[in-house]
Amino acid sequence: MTSSSPEARWQLLQGSPGFTALAEACPEEWAAVHAELSGVFERCDAGEIRALIARSASRGTRNERFLSGERSGRAFELFVSEQIRQRLTELALRQYAFSAATGIKAGKARFNLFNGLIAQRLLFKQGLERKPVSLRAFRLLWPLLWQKRLLMPLVEKRGIYCFYSRELIAGLASLICNRKALEIAAGDGTLARFLTGQGASVLASDDHSWGKAVDYPATVEKLDAVAAIARHQPKVVICCWPPAGNHFERQVFRSRSVDTYIVIGSRSRFITGNWADYTAQTAFDWAERADLSQLVLPPELQAGVWVFQRKPVVAEQP
């Protein structure tokens, strides 16, 4: 075992250490994770990789006894070790995806001056505050960036998974029309803000669990998806980049108030969304809106927009 106590390692984990720091502090857990990942990637089994991603994204099983203070004995030690292994798996998978997306195996990825200036002017209002992107300008300038593969890995750590063209915002606002809408798992509320600016009535909610990466404005209500739907009873629900295998989307289909559910996510079924619930539910017809999918930026994401529409109630014949 490592020399540090289970309590010390638990406190280290609460500080959200980076991959290298956590692996160095917990070599036994990293050895176990490394052996598992090596086998998974060597076998190249898509189902096994999907299961590993889903498991790492689940954030572990909460144990209220330990979280409330009961931290002596072998049981707590095993609990901490399990949490560390899961966090190491998540960080290692994220590093692997970054390497695959950028081709960078070591060191930091940075835009050079030209690529950085063009990307900033094209996609952001200031800092990392996104703006509705001019599709015409994007088609003109995006091909000029030879470092475009760096963009998403760099901004993902701040909770940015895609960019919205002006045309996409207009199309979504038209789809929402005058109905009461709610964005769930909204992050910093960018999509809801853009839609509101287009004339739609959209509230934003998020459980604020990414507080160390995302700056939540006051306009993003601190509620998880289930509680937000129950409180606001929206006619339309929208979610961008729902976590893979999440449990909250099924509540959308169970809610009687919801007539339309709009999902923006990856076509890769193990990156976003709960596809098992999508296919299992029977209350909604659903299909990809290809006209809207092509308006999600950048195109290298291979993103899609899916619209679920509640089936009409057929009156029983007397």
Image: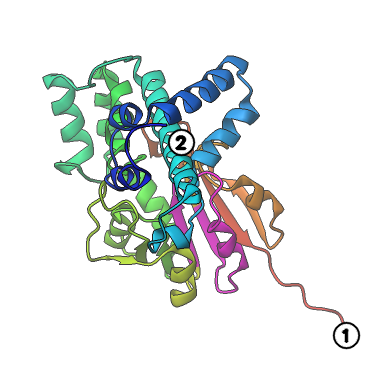
Q: Is residue 14 left or right of residue 295?
A: left
Vertical comparison of 12 with 109: above or below = below
Q: Earlier in the sequence, mark 2 or mark 1?
A: 2
Q: Quadrant of residue 100?
A: top left
The location of residue 18, given as percent across then percent down, is 29, 34
Query: Which amino acid type corresponds to the residue marked 2 in the rendered image?
Result: Arg
Query: Which amino acid type corresponds to the residue marked 1 in the rendered image?
Result: Pro
The location of residue 67, given as percent across then percent down, is 40, 59
Q: Quadrant of the C terminus?
A: bottom right
* Residue at the image position 50 percent from the left and 37 percent from the top: 271
Q: Quadrant of residue 27?
A: top left
39 vs 57, nearest the viewer: 39
Give the residues in magenta.
236-262
* Residue at the image position 54 percent from the left and 41 percent from the top: 55
55 vs 73, nearest the viewer: 73
Q: Quadrant of residue 270?
A: top right
Q: Is residue 187 left or right of residue 225?
A: left
**Residue identified by numbered label 1:** 318
Asked if the residue at tag 1 contacts the one at tag 2, i.e. Cβ–Cβ closer than 8 Å, the answer is no
Q: Residues within 10 Å of mark 2 (few under 14, many from 20)?
A: many
173 vs 106, nearest the viewer: 106
Mark sitting on residue 85: 2
Q: Residues within 10 Å of mark 1 (few under 14, many from 20)?
A: few
The location of residue 174, given as percent across then percent down, is 42, 58
Q: Is residue 257 magenta?
A: yes
The location of residue 239, given as percent across then percent down, is 45, 54
